[in-house]
Amino acid sequence: MKKSLVALALMGAFSSAAFAQSSVTIYGTLDAGINKTTHTANSSVQEGKRDNNKLGFRGVEDLGSGLKALFQLEIRFEPDTGTNESGSRPLFQGQSRVGLQGSFGTVRLGRGLTSLQETTTAYEPWSGQPNVAGFQTDIMVGGYRSAQTGSGSDPLGAAGNSGNRFANGLWYNSPVYNGFQLNLNMASKENNGLTTAIVGRGTAAAPQYPIGSLASAYPYSVSATFSEPGASVPRYSVYAAAERNALEVKLWSVGAYFRPIPDLKLMANYSKQDLEHITAINDTINTWMVGANYNVGPGKILFGYGQKDPDGSLKWKQLSVGYEYNLSARTYLYLDLSQKKLPLTTTATFTTKQNHYALGVHHNF
Amino acid sequence: MKKSLVALALMGAFSSAAFAQSSVTIYGTLDAGINKTTHTANSSVQEGKRDNNKLGFRGVEDLGSGLKALFQLEIRFEPDTGTNESGSRPLFQGQSRVGLQGSFGTVRLGRGLTSLQETTTAYEPWSGQPNVAGFQTDIMVGGYRSAQTGSGSDPLGAAGNSGNRFANGLWYNSPVYNGFQLNLNMASKENNGLTTAIVGRGTAAAPQYPIGSLASAYPYSVSATFSEPGASVPRYSVYAAAERNALEVKLWSVGAYFRPIPDLKLMANYSKQDLEHITAINDTINTWMVGANYNVGPGKILFGYGQKDPDGSLKWKQLSVGYEYNLSARTYLYLDLSQKKLPLTTTATFTTKQNHYALGVHHNF
Amino acid sequence: MKKSLVALALMGAFSSAAFAQSSVTIYGTLDAGINKTTHTANSSVQEGKRDNNKLGFRGVEDLGSGLKALFQLEIRFEPDTGTNESGSRPLFQGQSRVGLQGSFGTVRLGRGLTSLQETTTAYEPWSGQPNVAGFQTDIMVGGYRSAQTGSGSDPLGAAGNSGNRFANGLWYNSPVYNGFQLNLNMASKENNGLTTAIVGRGTAAAPQYPIGSLASAYPYSVSATFSEPGASVPRYSVYAAAERNALEVKLWSVGAYFRPIPDLKLMANYSKQDLEHITAINDTINTWMVGANYNVGPGKILFGYGQKDPDGSLKWKQLSVGYEYNLSARTYLYLDLSQKKLPLTTTATFTTKQNHYALGVHHNF
C-alpha cells in the first residue's frame, strides 16, 4: 500500500508516465566519407558527409474513424565533429511537426521542408541530398540558397538557421486522387531571430528589412504532382511548384521523371527565381537540369547535368556522376565525381573549373 | 573464435554494451497552434505552443528489497522553430535527475522543478502549463518569474536559463502517509554562468550580486500536501509551500482543490513573494487565483480568474477560459481566450487590456 | 485504397519509414553527487559528476558474409545543470561514428576517442573517468589536456571543444590475434573552428598557428595491446601507444595490468609528452602512475598514486582512494578521497595540497 502511494506521489515528477508507452520509432542516417573540392577556401582532403545526418523520433496514434495523430522530431548533426548541423542550426533542424491525418488529407504544424522543397527531391538524381555533386542546392531550386539577398525559404531566421524550411509553418497534403496530389504550405510573418539587416532595395542606413522585421507578406509554398495512378513505383510523374519567402522572393519549378524500363529513371526540371522585390536589376535566375539513375546489379549509377543562369552574371554549369554500391537495403558505399564551372566571386569575369571527389559510407537505421 | 574476439576488442568503443538493454521509456509532448496576443512587441498572428514541448527518456531499475534506481532526462524545444526551448535553454531543460526510491521515500540529484513549482501545478486550471491563458507563470507563484530582480527559482544561471527549476539540486519526497506527503528540496550555492550583475540593494558600481557571485544562502524549496487518503483521484487536496532562491527572495504559497462531483474540480490559491533582501521599497507581491475544470462529454472546460498585487504598483487582473476536445487519451484540440489587465511598462500609470487567443493541437507520446 | 495512397503520398515527409525499424539500442549513464575541492576558484560544496554523463544510440546491421555495419551517437551532458557537456561541447561529444566490421577488423569514420585515449582507460584505476580523483586527465596521458599550449588531442577545435578526441577521424581496429590487437587512428588537417590563435614558437603578432590554421601534419594515434589470449577477463595485459596532435605535440604511453588473484587488479603506466614543436624550452612532461582495484564483497576499493614532472617546473603528486558499493550490476554509490600536491599557478614556486572529496550515485541504463 505504502509503495503504490509513493509511486502515485511521484506522478508530478513523472507526469507523462500516466500515458502508456506509445510506439515511438527511432530512425536516422549516418553518412561519412572523405572528400576534396578544388578552388575552395579549404581545398585539402576533408572528412565530411554526402547526405544529411539525422537522428529522428516519430509516431502515429490511431484515433479511430480513420483519423490519426502524428508527430516527427528530427535532430540533424555533423558526423565529423558531432555538432548540430553546421554547428549553429536548431536542434531539430530536420523537422519538428505535429498533425492530424484522415480522409481529408494531412495537416501539420511546426517547422519542416517547404512543399516545393519536399516535392522536388524525388525529381533529382541525388534524391535532393545537399552535397556538392547533387543539384538540389545550387541548381535545382534556382540557386535559391546561394542568392545572397533573400537566401532560402526562411530568410528571417537566425544566422546559419536558414535553408529550405519554413519555421512557424502550416502544411496540408491532400489525399492522392487518381494519381494527383496537392500540397499547400504557408507560414506566419514572424521573425525568428534575424541579426543582420537585409538591405534589399533600401540603403545600408535604411535597409528594406531592418533587424526585427516581420515578413512583408505571408510566405507560402505550393506543389502539385501527378504520378501513374495506383502504382507503388510510378513509371512517370510530373510536378509544378511555386514558393514565396518572407522577403517576397518568388520561385517557380516544374519537372518530371520517367522510367522507360524499371531500372532506369530519367529526370528533368526547370526553375525560375524572381528577386524583383529586393533587387533593382538582374532580378531573375533561371536553372535547368537533366539526370538519370540506373540500377546495375547491386549498384546504382547516378548522372546529372545542369545550368544556372543568373541575369547579368556568368552562367554556372555542373556535370556529376556517382555510384552507389548497396551492401544491404540500408547501407551503401558511394563515389561521386563532379565538375562545376562557376565564377569564384560575384565580380569574377571568368568561370573556374571546380572539381569535387567524394568516397564514403551511407547507413540508415 | 576470431569473430567473438573482434567483438571483445571493441568493448572499449562500445563499453556500455556490457550491460543488458534496460527498459528506457521514451515519452514526450508536441503542442503547436496559432495564437495572437494584443499589445505585445509582436501582436501579429503567430505559431506557438500552449504547453511545454518535450522529448524525454526515463527508466527505473529494480534493485531488490523494495529499492529502485531511477533516472529522467527531458529535452525541451520549440515546435515552431525546432530550437532548444527559448532558443537558449539547456538541452535537458525539462529535467536531468537520478536517484533512489525505497520505503524511506525518494531522493534525487540534478536539475528539475523545485518542490514548490512541482506541487502547485496540480492546483492550477491549466495544469501549470506556461501559456498566456494559464496562471502559473504570471499569477500563481507570485509573478516570481516576471519580477525583474531576482527572477525565478534559479537566478544565478546563464541568461535565458532561469525559470522554475533548481540546478545543482537535491530532492526528497516522503512516502504518502495517511494522505500526507512532504517534499524537500535544496541546492548548492553554485553560480551557473550569470553574465550580468544583479544590482539589488547595491549600486551599478557595487552591485549586490556581482558576476560570478555564489548564492548568499542555500536555496531551498519545500511543500507539504494533504489529499483524500487512499483515493487514486482525490476528492480534495490542500498544499502549503515555501521557497528561497539564491538571492534570498522568498515565496510562500497555499492552495486547495475540491471535487464536489467527479467531473468538476474547483481550485484556489494564494501566494506571497518577499523581495526584501534585494529591494529597499515595495518588496512584496501578493497574488490569488480561483479556477475550475469541468468535464463535458469528450471535452473539458477550463476557467480561471486571478490577481497580482505588487506593492506600490498597479494591480494585474486575469480572466481566462479554455476548452479542450479530446480526440483520444493522448491527443486533444484546444481553444483559449484570455484577457489580462496590466501596466505595459513598469512605470505605466494605467492598465491596458491585453487579449489572447489560441487554437491548437496537443499530442502526448 | 485512398488511405494507402495518402500514406504513400507522405513518403516524402516520412522517407525513412521506407526502412523497417532496426534495433537501435539506447544506453547511457547518469552520475551525480556532492563534492568539494579545496584551493580552487570555487571551493564551496558543489553538486557535480564523477563519470561522464551520457545518452547514446547505437546499432549493428548484419550485412551477411560476416560483414556488419555499425553506428554510435553519444550525447554528453552535465547532470547538475542539464546543459551539453561543459555547457559548450558538441551535442554528440561522446562520439559520432559509422563504420564496417568484418574479418579484416573494424573501420570507422567520424568523431571519437583517439586510439591512445580509448586504450589507456582499461589501465587506470578509475577506468579513465574524468574526475579529480582519477588519473586519466592530469597524470596518465602526460597532463596532455592541461598543457596550455597544444592542449588535448584535438587542439584546432572551437573553444571548450577540445579533449581526448579526434574530429574528422578514421579508425581501424584489427581483429584480436593470439591476444594481440592493433588500433590505428588518423584525422584530416581540418580546422574545426579555433577562435584564438596559438602562439607556440611564434609571437603574438605572428603566431605559429593563426586563426583558421590547418594542422601542420596529419594527426594520428596508434596503440597496440597484448592480453592473455582467449580469456574473457584477462589475467594480464600490456599496451604501448603513441599520438601526434594537429600541433605536432607528441605523446607516448606504455602500461600494464595484472590480476594475481581474480579480485585484485594491479596497474601501472608511464607516459611522455613532447612539446618541442611548439615550445622552445622545457618541452617535455613525464608522468607515471600505479594503481589497484580490489573487489570486497559487494564493493570495490580503488587506489592510485602518480606523479607528473613537467620540465623546468614543479612536480605534481597525486594520491587517491575510492570505494564503490554496488547496488546492482548497473548502479553503485561511490566515495572518493584524493590529495594532489601541485603549483596553483604556472609561476608558483611552491606546491599546495589540494584535497578532494566526492560522494554520489552512478547509474547505467
Image (cartoon, coloured by chain):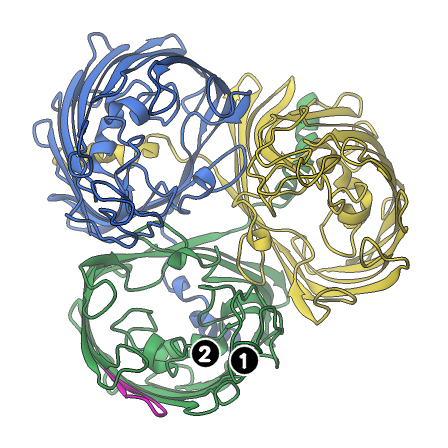
Chain colours: A green, B yellow, C blue
* CB-based contact (under 8 Å), mark 2 and mark 1: yes
- B66 with respect to C95 (left or right): right
Residue B344: x percent and y percent?
Answer: 81, 59
Vertical relation: A198 (above or below) C258:
below
Left or right placement of residue C223 versus residue A110 in this view: left
Relative vertical location of residue B193 with respect to residue C194 in this rendering, above or below: above
Q: Residue at x 59, y 27 (%)?
A: B108
Q: Nearer the viewer, residue A299 or A307?
A: A307
The numbered dot on residue B230 is none
What amino acid type is highlighted by mark number 1?
Leu
How far, Cα to Cα, is label 2 from label 1?
Answer: 9 Å
Residue indicated by mark 1: A247
- The chain that hosts pointer 1 is A
Q: Secondary structure at mark 2?
A: loop
Quick check: can you spot residue B70?
Answer: yes
Q: Which residues are magenta?
A: A306-317
Of callouts 2 and 1, the N-terminal one = 2
Mark 2, residue position? A149
Q: Residue at x 44, y 39 (%)?
A: C85
Q: Position of residue B143 (x, y in %)?
A: 79, 45
